[in-house]
Image (cartoon, rainbow, N blue to C red):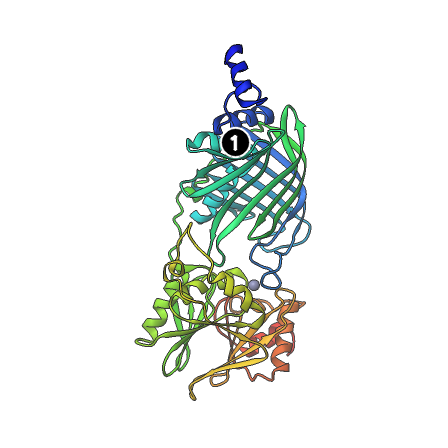
Amino acid sequence: MTKRLCLVAAIVLTAAGCSSPRDAASVLRDAQQAMGSVNSIQYSGTGMNAFFGQALTAGQEWPRRDMSSYTRTINYEQRSARDEMNFAQPTFGGQQQNTQVNGEKAWNVGPAGPAPQPPAVAEERQLGIWLTPHGFLKGAAASGNATLSGTEGASVISFTALGKYKVDGTIDAQNHVSKVETKIPNPVLGDTDLVATYSDYKDFSGVQFPTKILVEQGGFPLWDLTITSVTPNAALDLAVPEVVASASAPAVQTMSTKLANGVWHVTGGSHHSVVVEFSDYIAVVEAPLDEARSLAVIAEAKKLVPKKPLRYVLTTHHHFDHTGGLRTYVAEGATVMTHQSNVPYFEKTLAAPATISPDAQSKAAKMPMLQGVSGKDILTDGKQTIEVYATSGDTHTNEYTLVYLPGPRILIEGDAYSPGPPGAPVPPMPPPNAVALYDEVQKLKLNVATIAPIHGRGAVPMAEFTKFVGKK
Ligand SMILES: [Zn+2]
């Protein structure tokens, strides 16, 4: 703009100054200039990574897991990233974890080498790259669809990442990325808020990087990090391991084993279910993982018990890996029978929108029907009977229900006991939650003959469990 035009503009806009018009491109340019440009980055620190979906009580925060060290390395051009976590305590997945992504391929590196991860995990990790401060600026600039809203000093740049994630980033008065938010699909929660907050920016070799990172997912902290060192343009070349490149997503499989008249253990994956036939309907105990697993189990149930409606689905506890199929069952018209303490939570999640990855319930929009269990509840037709006992849980969850079939004397339980391979050695010290399960069964005076677990090799005689917990 010439001086003269500037003067005119200044008069017209009354002291608006003389700058180029604010648009998405200029805001991104200013931010990139202020924050410094990198092709790759490595940042390290300490903090915590929470166990998403594994709250002690439904609706409470995710359990925090402290890390003694954390390092993330990202190559923005390669769309690759590596996270190295050292947890302070032993945790599910190992005390040391190493997760990687390169484009559409994701894998974890453990003592047994690289383990391929499903496409949904790769997508989430890739999205994670575009949610970092520099990644956001690069992603928005490269998208060709960035738009500007907000106000000066709190500009909001929005773009669509990976074809379906609307990403909104806030740029503050210092031209730093202070917040990046999006929504991701989740089988339990539907559209799930994912919000990264960046603060306390410092200079690292000419590049500005936040020393405080807080990432919240589903309303509760997932990552809370204090960053102590940053290396701009750190080298990272993550070749996709051959075993990962050639891996195909495992097919959903079901196998069923008849445990008693009208009772089948449906296995074939990491989490099992139990199908129970009543005179007029079917009940399924446990709806784990996701819609794909649930559709397969429902199809199996209908094959085992033709021409009867699926009327009930029961849960052992609310953890997401055990309830990711509930929305599918609700869409099918089933009533959810669960611990009373889960009812307010599931009333919300079962009716939540799922627009990013639409599921059966987002189309059926059925009003969720829940039957909360406190104390004892039963389903019976006079011949077949299921007893459900609400317990106060253990160190894994503050609520679980024990599902017991008094006729064939079968107990169905979730994570407290998962039978290993035949002949596996009895642990020198039995796991406390297995002992708690044993004590609960004694307290309730359940005359169990067989345990049909949700995890593990399959149904086992009660005697094997008794030996496992060192009671006989
Ligand atoms: Zn669990």
Q: Is residue 337 rendered to the left or right of residue 306?
A: right
Q: Say whether mark 1 is within 8 Å of ligand 1.
A: no
Task: Please state the total of marks drawn on the protein image.
Answer: 1
Residue depicted at 53% across the width and 49% down the height:
193
172 to 319, vertically: above or below: above
Residue 263 picture location, percent across and down: 42, 78
In depth, the one of 254 and 326 nearer the eye is 326
Query: Which image quadrant for residue 46?
Result: top right
Residue 365 picture location, percent across and down: 40, 62
Residue 113 picture location, percent across and down: 52, 46
Residue 78 appears in the picture as rendered: no
Query: Which image quadrant for residue 395?
Result: bottom right
Residue depicted at 50% across the width and 32% down the height:
76
Residue depicted at 49% across the width and 67% down the height:
457
Residue 369 picture location, percent across and down: 46, 71
Q: Residue furthest bottom?
A: 382
- Disc 1 marks which residue? 137
Quadrant of picture, ligand 1: bottom right
Amino acid type at image mark 1: Leu
Q: Secondary structure at mark 1?
A: helix
Query: Which image quadrant for residue 298?
Result: bottom left
Q: Residue furthest left?
A: 307
Which quadrant is the C terminus positioned in? Answer: bottom right
Q: Is residue 408 rendered to the left or right of residue 153?
A: left
Residue 223 appears in the picture as rendered: yes
The local crowd at label 1, few if under 14, some if 14 to 19, many if 20 or more residues have their Cα within 10 Å, is: many
272 to 125, vertically: above or below: below
Q: Is residue 84 rendered to the left or right of residue 369?
A: right
Residue depicted at 64% across the width and 35% down the height:
210
